[in-house]
Every structure is written in C-alpha cells, then in structure tokens.
Amino acid sequence: MEFKDVIKKPRVAILIFLLIIGAIILGVNGLKYGLDFSGGTQFTIELDKEVTDASTLALVTSTISQRLDWSGLKDTTVNTWGGKYVVAQVGTTDPAEIEALESVLYKQGRFENIMDGEILFNGEDILSVDKNPSQGYSITDTGSGYYSWTLPFTLKTKSAKKFAEMTFHKCVPSGTGGAYDCPKTFFFIDRPLNSVFIIPQDLYDEEQLLPTDPINKQSSTIELDEAMKNANIEYIIADTIDANVIAKLNDYKSKGIEKVIVPKSVYDLSGLDLNLQFVEIAKNNKEPWVWTASGLKSIIWVNEDITNLGAPNTSSSNFKVFYTLTIRGSAQNKDEAVYKSDNIFVLLSSGSLPVGVSNISKETISPVLGENFLTTIFIIGILAIIIVALVVYIRYKHPTLIAAIMVSTLAEVFLILVCASIIGWRLDLAAIVGLIAAIGTGVDDVVIITDEISKNKEEKEEHSLLAKVKRAFFMIFAAAATTIAAMVPILIFGFGFGKLTGFALTVIMGILIGVIITRPAYSEVVKYIMSK
C-alpha cells in the first residue's frame, strides 16, 4: 500500500479537509483574545440604592455576569465595590458590542405578561428560555420589507396552570363563520412603577391609535388608553407644565406616585421642586414613544386553543395546560431582529436585578499581560513541542513516526483554535493553559496507539493491527470519558463565573477533536508506517 492510498482513507481525508476549511476560517475570522492579552472595557455601574444584604449583592453580581457573558466565552469579571457600585470588565472594545451590553445593563429586567390589566405571569415564573429552532425559535424574512423573530420560553408548572385558569374561555364568538374575538396579552420589560406620564397634545394625537406591531405597517391598531390601562400608568395631556398640571401632579403624589415620565426636550423642567423624579425619554423613530416609555415589547393575541375554548367546564382538571409560550417581535433587518431577540433572551435568562441601575460609566482598559506575553507563550509552546518530540524520539527512534505524532498534535491544536474562531471565543490565560493540557492529553493518546501497534509482530491473530487499534481506542475513550466527566461540572456551574470555564471548555474541545478526528487519522498513518 502506497502513502497516497493512506491519504485517500476516509479518516485521513476528513482531517485534511477540515484543516483546509479551518485555514480559510482562521484567515477570515482570525482569533479574539480576552482581557489578559488585548484588554477590554470596564463598566462602573451605579445602583439605584445601596445594597447591604450579602445574598442580594451576590444576586446582583451573578445577574450582571450572565447579562454580560451568558455563554461564558467573552472573558468577563464582575466585582462589587461597597454596596452601591459594581465594577465589570469584559474583553471587548467593539463600539457596537459595547453599546449593546450597556443597553442590557441599564435594564432592571422586570418581565411581565399582562391581560386586561392583570399580571398573568412575570420573570420569576419562567423556567427556561430556548433558542433552539426545533422548539420555535426563528428569525424570518417576511417578504414584506421586515423580519420577524420568535423566542419560546417555558413556564414553571404552577405558573402554566395559573395562566390556563386566567385565560380560560376568554375568546368569545365574533360574527359568523366560526370566528372568535380573543383578548390581547401585553409583554412588558421594566414597566414603570408608581409613575405618571405627561404627553403633549400633538404626540397624543399622533399615538392615540397605536400599532400592535410598530415595524409591520399592515398591523392592526389599539387605543392608547388600552395600552396605558394594561401598563397601569396614568397620563396627563398638556403642552406645558403649568399650575393646573402641577396641581394634578401633587394629587398623584399624594396617591403614591414617585416618578414623572415625559418626552425628551419637550418641557421646561428647570425650577420644578415637587419632590418627584422627572425622567426624560427620547422618541424612538422605530416605535411609538408610548411603547418605549412604558417598556412594551410585544402585543400578542391568545387563541382559541390557548384559552381551552373546547373544554366542557371550568374545572381545572379539564384544562389543557400550555407550558411553552412564545414572545414575538419585528425588526427592519436581520441584524436588528437578532439583536432584539438576543436582548430579550439575555434578560429573561439572567432574571431581573433586585435593584435598578441609575448610571453607568465606561472606560477602555489595557491588557493585564499584553500581546508580548502571548508571543512568549507561543515560543514556549513551540519549545515544549520540540522537547516532547525529542522524548518521543528517544522512545521510538523512528523519525517518520515522530513526524506523524507532531503533525497529529499540531493539527489538534489548530482545530481547537478554528473552533474558538467560529464561536467567537475570547482566549484568556486559562484557555491557553487548557490548550497546553489538551496537547498533553493528545500526546498521551497517540503514544498509547503507537505502543499497541508496535508490539511484537509475532503475537497471535487476535492481536492483529486492527485488534491492537481497537484496544488502544478503548483505553483512549475510557480516559477521555473520565476527563470530560471531571470538566462538565465546571461548565455547568461556571458559565459566566470565572476563568475556569475557559480551561474546561478547551480541555473538552481538545479531547473531542482528538477522539473524533485526529486520533483516528493518526491510527491509519501509524498502521501504514508500522507495516513497512
């Protein structure tokens, strides 16, 4: 058998194909590095009020960590400074990404679903949020000049049953032909509490009829009063804050109102001393001001199935309980649709902050170690490979075999870096250490394969080359399984919390790439070498 025949074997051909594709991917995407090597951005987050309870402070820290880095791939650190400030560092300086992260951080993240002014469920009732397309997640080009997105989530058992009870038989017959008139549910994030709106007459006239989908020009409309009723927000129509408006505000204040929300740059707020917090919110040209100011994210009609219209009576035993529901939205383009759905996903997954955020300042920070240190690590890595090659040469004294081992090891490292590039993983020091650990594991495995195949050729038939390779892979799979089992808890409990995540992810990725791709290809090559 010629070496060209070995290259044509599926295992070797797959490895060569992946190396070629990987080179293209790395050439296009490159690699991203974390705080250790390329620096990043520091957010100094000021909370609305000082937090003194340790468990509440821990919840604030974990929630912010998940919002900044829900996947555990961005190299993020979060620490508290007293009970009033949180200092968060993330390994990116991209302006668009920083703006998106800042937007998420400013939100307290209180999620509520309201129908007819009653809260059906809130963020605490959500068990999980799913971005799996098979479960209903999608980004779709509607063909009408905009994109729609859907994000499924699962309610806890008790909350799902409550939702079924509160929506039971809410659809009523409408006209003929079996049509039904069903109620609407309003999804809010950070709906203003204890607040009153002041709206100028021209803005009220413009938004008296609100679209149920601001992006879809053909969507139906609802009255502003209906939206405000479900938001539980009172409003005053006035072009100026005169004595009459001040009297109304004082009346609202006596009823517990603490905040006044107004359109930005419309009213003169100087000189007002009402002991009320005035908040100016700019008008967003992509959606009505009332949508932005009230935190309204989606308006969705329930349907006949959801309301159990066919159930014979109101007994809860007859309810068909729906555990998985969907929040929907629209955007002008695909990137915006992805951004909006990801924003909601992060907020629902991380949960709400126990306190609000009053201010965020940010600054660019220098790398802890710097790119020169990365170069030093690269040189150390090359020296380590050379030393390993010398040790292996002493063991086997076979130059061709040594070359095969080194090529297999380097191919494994290369494919790990390709995977890091694909998923946008920011490599930090822990990830580099994990990479070195993965290299060590890889060399151990190829030595096992080589030892098994190079045993005395006079052995019995059951110890043929094929049997020896099988025995070697049994040992390799057993070792891989135990190592992965040790790393999995770090991934489960470590995403978004500390640098151990990068170490564990690198080790697991290296093991899987080795067991599935590089080790099988190496076994084909070493069988050819040993047969000569």
Image (cartoon, rainbow, N blue to C red):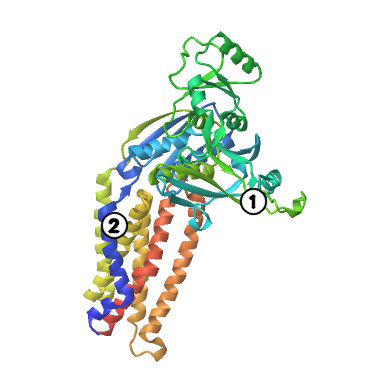
Which residue appears at 36% of the width and 48% of the height? Answer: 426
Q: What kind of residue is marked 2?
A: Ile
Residue 139 position within the rendered picture, expressed as x and y whole percent measured from the top left: 44, 50
Marks 2 and 1, how far apart at CA = 56 Å
Q: What kind of residue is marked 1?
A: Gly
Residue 137 position within the rendered picture, expressed as x and y whole percent measured from the top left: 49, 52
In this rendering, position of residue 416 left or right of residue 2: right
Q: Residues within 10 Å of mark 2 (few under 14, many from 20)?
A: some
Residue 371 position within the rendered picture, expressed as x and y whole percent measured from the top left: 26, 45
Farthest residue in the front direction?
176
In this rendering, position of residue 28 left or right of residue 483: left
Closer to the observer: label 2 or label 1? 1
Which residue appears at 34% of the width and 71% of the height? Answer: 446
> Which residue is denoted by mark 1 in the rendering?
177
Secondary structure of the residue carrying numbered label 2? helix
Which sits in the foreground, 89 or 322? 322
Q: Residues within 10 Å of mark 1 (few under 14, many from 20)?
A: few
Q: Quadrant of the C terminus?
A: bottom left
Q: Quadrant of the N terminus?
A: bottom left
Secondary structure of the residue carrying numbered label 1? loop
Is 202 placed above or below 514 here?
Answer: above
Closer to the chain start, of discs 2 and 1, is 2
Which residue appears at 64% of the width and 20% of the height? Answer: 256
Residue 7 position within the rendered picture, expressed as x and y whole percent measured from the top left: 26, 76
Q: Which mark is residue 25?
A: 2
One can see residue 408 in this view: no
Which sits in the foreground, 117 or 222? 222
In this rendering, position of residue 174 left or right of residue 514: right
Which sits in the foreground, 297 or 306? 306
In which image quadrant can residue 412 be found?
bottom left
Is 232 placed above or below 164 here?
Answer: above
The count of marks equals: 2
